[in-house]
Amino acid sequence: MSFSYLFYFSSLFLCLFLAYWGSRYYLKSLIYLLILFLACITGFRGYEVGIDTFNYVEIWNGILVGKPVYVEPGFQWLICFIQKIATSPTVLFFTCSLITYSCFVLRLWDFKNIASFPLMIAILFMLVLMPSMNVMRQYCAIAIIFYSTRFLFRKKYAKYIVGIVLASLLHYSALIAISFWGFELLEWKNLTLLKRRFYLILIVVLLFFAQMIYFFVMTEYGHYFEDKEEKLGILTLAKIFFIITSAFLSGIWRKKILSENDKFIIKISFWMYLLGVLIESLGYFFPYMSRIGLPFSIFAVLYWGILFRNTKNMTLNFVYSIALFLFVGLPFLLSMVDNGFGTMPYSFFYQNLN
């Protein structure tokens, strides 16, 4: 187990190293090396690493012998293609991992001028690395959608539709990305001050009632909720309060030095992160709703990077650092102590070959 702690922390440090020097000197070769390194961590894992890894091995074996499997067609086609050139499911894991981290990292690289790239990579590592070794198909689909937003922001709608189709062939939940079009139409500056205040008050009121319902359900029926991750949801209200207040205290979308396009991206990251938290909070009552929120909440990575890059006030940065630890760092550490989503202890695939 001590090897696993050392492995994950040293991997995080190496990712930070590559991201820092790659972004500082615009060395794309280091960024590609970073992608490859992340893909190797999740792609070359042992078959007992991750709660769902063995299920993917079973799907691989089922397709190999012609048994019916119940997964999205795109994933089946990918397996069939890989089985023509390889005999190990490790190749499948590595391929999915390479797609996932190529899309995530390269898209985050697009925002290097308005967000802290090393911080975004560190947060991506803590939020995504371990879960992606479980819900591999969905994170691969989310990564494709996340990368495809570059086409949406550039109004290249046909390419964005292709991205949605490809992602949904891996996991049907990716179809929720159709709703991202609503944010392309959202121009905050076109709303009157009265409407802005109305929407903010409405959000706060809805959040208040949602939390009251949550506390009531947990008090009366809490014994039905055994999942430890769900019990961490007590921080949901604090997280929502932080997202809203941090955006207005730092004034990140009012900075005159930013272009209109940059301001639009900042607004998108804010609303996506906020919506993601709201949707995931429904997972306390409806288990699969937390997964529906993942394509939205992945924008938390971008939001944190923007927040720290564009806040010069030392006091605010100190407060944000505490919040970052509570909302990202602490859950990461606790997950490692509590089996790390089945990724503790870590091992490589070849360690279990007999």
Image (tube, rainbow, N blue to C red):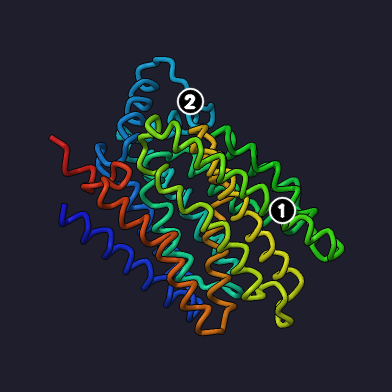
Measured as percent of width and height from the top left, residue 336 is found at 28, 52
Q: Residue at x 56, y 84 (%)?
A: 312
Q: Which residue is mark 2?
A: 71
Amino acid type at image mark 1 = Leu
Residue 56 occupies quadrant:
top left
Amino acid type at image mark 2 = Val
Between 145 and 267, the one lying in front of the other is: 267
Q: Is residue 318 left or right of residue 49?
A: right
Label 2: few (<14), some (14–19) or many (≥20) C-alpha neighbours in 10 Å: some
Q: Which residue is mark 1?
A: 152
Q: Is residue 165 left or right of residue 109?
A: right
The quarter of the picture where the C terminus appears is top left
Q: Residue at x 44, y 31 (%)?
A: 221
Q: Residue at x 72, y 53 (%)?
A: 152
Label 1: few (<14), some (14–19) or many (≥20) C-alpha neighbours in 10 Å: some
| Residue at far left of view | 354
Check the image and report above or below for 44 versus 109: above
Measured as percent of width and height from the top left, residue 143 is found at 53, 49
Between 183 and 11, the one lying in front of the other is: 183
